[in-house]
Amino acid sequence: MSYYKNKNVLVTGGTGLIGRPLLQLLLDSGANVTCVSLDKPSDIDGRVNFVKADLRNFDNCLSVCKNQQIVFNLVGIKGSPKMCAERPASFFVPTIMFSINMMEAARQANVERYLFTSSIGVYHPAEVFNEDDMWKTFPSENDRIPGWSKRIGELQAEAYEIEYKWENISIVRPANVYGPYDNFDPENAMVIPSLISRAVSGERPLKVWGDGSPVRDFIYAKDVAVGMMKVLESGYNKPVNLGSGEGVKIKEIAETIASLMPDECKIEWDVSKPSGDRQRIMNTERALDLGISAETDLKQGIKETIDWYNRHISLESGRYNAFTDKTYT
């Protein structure tokens, strides 16, 4: 993408699930890339300018935005619905602070283009999630904390457009993202990384909450990164869903992971535990109009994620985890 060549591009949360492939894609496009994270910069390409900074501090946000032309704001808290229910403040407060601080710092720094990463969690349960329907309802009760925290970020973008005429903000709403560099801590990870972590560690039978019937929309992290770059380059400033547009049952996910283990991996369904919303699928027509689609086959993506995890298990123990950080508790 020649649009990014020689541009100064900042990626917050660049050591994470979507950030890692985004960094590489930007480097391949000839951008001058800066990454901000609280994670260790292990195995990051040496061409990336790495800055360790806590973006809950506004001065840090001002500092990293200086001289940047483009900002991809991916920083956030990655955790399971269980952790959001048990530690809602640990998710809600930092997420809002990241959004407010970074958007204001980017505005003050006269950044040319800014991308805000929202979430599928902003939607109310429905057969299909359409971008323009979001404000007609409330987030799902199962996603109340992350949903409202991301809605506040989207509302901030709308407020900036009205008051400051700052129309250079793009918003993407990724579906259920998976891939390398995810949070694989089984205590607070999402469904795919949690199942992978426990299956690889030898949990037999592999225990899964619910009955496996809920349907979800999954998309590989690299496909999301490509979509983000295309949305920002287009200058489109209405929210864009980034998903596959196809529904997959949790049962199929668990069975796929089990089938990729080197030994027999039986599954045990714990129907005493909640299954979550029945169906969560994105309408991806807006993305398709922008030339964006999910290119990675689900089984292939899961296999690549398992292979990566097997090679990088040692990295996981040293990664920053907001739910175990004692600094702000």
Image: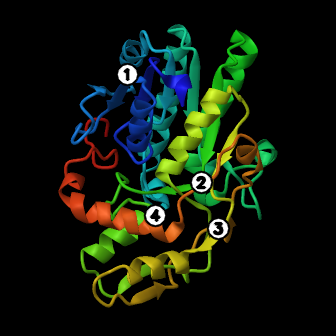
- Quadrant holding the N terminus: top right
Residue 187 lies left or right of residue 248; in this view the side is left
Cβ atoms at labels 3 and 4 below 8 Å apart: no
Give residue 91's quadrant in the image: top left
User: In the image, 173: left or right of 298?
Assistant: right
Compare marks 3 and 4 and give the one earlier in the sequence: 3
The disc, 1 or 3, on the residue closer to the chain's N-terminal end is 1
Spatial CA span between label 2 and label 3: 14 Å
Looking at the image, which residue is at 25% across and 80% down?
202
Q: Nearer the viewer, mark 2 or mark 1?
A: 2
Query: In this figure, which residue is indicated by the disc labeled 4?
Result: 301
Three-letter code, disc 2 = Ala
Q: Please say if 199 is above or below 28.
A: below
Q: Locate residue 94, reporting x and y percent.
A: 44, 35
Q: In the figure, 28 relative to 64: above or below?
A: below
Other residues around mark 1 within 10 Å, as few (<14) / some (14–19) / many (≥20): few
Q: Nearer the viewer, residue 270 or 247?
A: 247
How far apart marks 3 and 4 lie (CA) works out to 24 Å
Residue labelled with disc 2: 175
The residue lying at 72 percent from left, 52 percent from top is 284
Q: Which residue is mark 1?
A: 57
Task: Say which label, 2 or 4, has the lower sequence index.
Answer: 2
- Disc 4 residue type (three-letter): Gly
Q: Three-letter amino acid code at disc 3?
A: Asp
Q: CA distance from mark 1 to mark 4?
A: 36 Å
Q: Which residue is mark 3?
A: 277
Q: Residue 173's spot in the image, x, y percent?
A: 62, 44
Quadrant (top left/top right/bottom left/bottom right) for the C terminus: top left
| Residue type, mark 1 in image | Asn
Question: Measured from the top left, where is residue 193 in percent x and y?
Answer: 39, 64
